[in-house]
Image: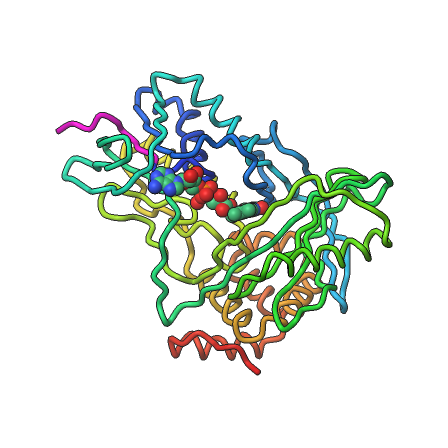
Amino acid sequence: MEPEYDYLLAGGGAAGLSLAYHLSQEPRLRGKRVLLLEPAAKEQNDRTWSFWTDQPTPYDAVLAAEWRQLAFRSPQFSVVLPLRRHRYCTLRGLDFYRFVQAALAARPAQFTRVEARVEHLVNTPAGVVAHTSAGEFRARYAFDSRPPHLTPRPDRRYLWQHFVGWEVETDFDAFDAATPVFMDFTVPQQRECRFVYVLPFGPRRALVEYTLFSSQLLQPAEYEEALRAYLHQLLAGRPYRVAETETGAIPMTDHSFEARDGAHIVNLGTRGGRVKASTGYAFLRMQQQAARLTEALATTGTLPHDLTGDRWQFHLFDTLLLDIMQRRGERTRDIFAELFQRNPVERILDFLDERTTWPQNLQVMNSVTPWPFLRSIVQVLRGQPGKREE
Ligand SMILES: Cc1cc2nc3c(=O)[nH]c(=O)nc-3n(C[C@H](O)[C@H](O)[C@H](O)COP(=O)(O)OP(=O)(O)OC[C@H]3O[C@@H](n4cnc5c(N)ncnc54)[C@H](O)[C@@H]3O)c2cc1C
């Protein structure tokens, strides 16, 4: 049977909508029919994405803020780093959803949105059948960004980036509006990797997030207590109001996410391994994949041979850092301090973006104390994730 749609998007969150947007902007794909299956209305500001970039993005007009420098703080080393090439950007989820929905609504013949939950996607010789809460749909290709269900493997590392953030307001100038705090490691580490992240939207308003990279989530009261202590010190005991709250738990793992599921189904977003294992950043990686897929579909009519462009050496670096976080989480602070102290910030951002060359990777590797990494290499070669060291 001929598919009714060319492309079917299962899930319309960050990854699904990013691909939809890229498809909508490609003149060579104007004749294609795209079906978006998403159960939620996406009318809430359910998260805020931040990322750094040295390129224009499609969402520049709706960014909440952008900055040209970043602060890093730790007990041994603190610095404000001017960004010469990059900018650090913040995009509110709701602004992104509305922006993309408006672009899709402008092409009603091309895009159909159905509020439905996808239950199964099945490959067929001609494409894909989606079994959903609203019936069956057929398409040539499906792009699946439903949240993944991971079955943990004993040889892999499973941590979380988990956080509670408060968007706080004050009646006095309290924040340096020019300088987001990328990581403030001056908080007690409690044998884990713990830091505070601050996005100043103005001198009297900022998102302040207490963040951990670790395997166990905390009780809500523990994040809140840490936030209260941090804000008490930062604002010298002066009052503030909590205008909004953001909580999240992002998987940080070297689990191998499959880029595809058979001939006609491509996995996107978290499900497709776009969350960078050692940092939790994903938004720009999803844009890059959306651009790669769109370009291949427009030029060849089929999927690209390499669906992600990932390079194995960065996967190895991520694994080593996750192993250290798992064995001696509190060491992470020293590693980031060494990285920021001994490298130009642009090199670190390029390295975390997986854009650096081998000579640059060697410079980055040479800048950190080697023995924790050597120890993790042994664990990786043995196929055993490191365990918490006493
Ligand atoms: C609170 C929070 C803050 C984050 N901040 C950042 C950040 O600052 N920078 C960054 O780079 N990354 C960040 N991330 C990580 C990552 O960018 C986000 O998790 C991102 O939303 C992942 O995109 P996704 O499309 O995989 O998942 P989602 O955006 O969650 O989209 C998945 C979609 O699938 C839908 N769905 C669920 N079940 C079904 C079903 N059965 N059928 C069809 N659809 C279904 C959901 O309703 C949802 O809309 C953050 C994550 C969280 C949770």
Residue visible at 44% across and 74% down? Answer: 385
Magenta stretch in the rendered image: 1-9
Assign the N terminus to one quadrant of the image. Answer: top left
Q: Nearer the viewer, residue 345 or 147?
A: 147
Q: Is residue 180 left or right of residue 60?
A: right
**Residue 289 visible in the current orientation:** no
State the residue at coordinates (42%, 56%).
Answer: 311
Please tell me which residue is depicted at 47% across the width and 56% down the height of the picture. 251
**Which residue corresponds to the image point at 44% horizontal and 25% vertical from the top-left?**
25
Q: Quadrant of residue 46?
A: top right
Where's residue 55, x and y in %? 58, 38
Pick out the residue farthest to the bottom.
390
> Which coloring applies here?
rainbow
Asked if residue 159 can be seen in this view, the reply is yes
Magenta stretch holds residue 191:
no
- Residue 184 rendering spot, x and y as whole percentages: 71, 58
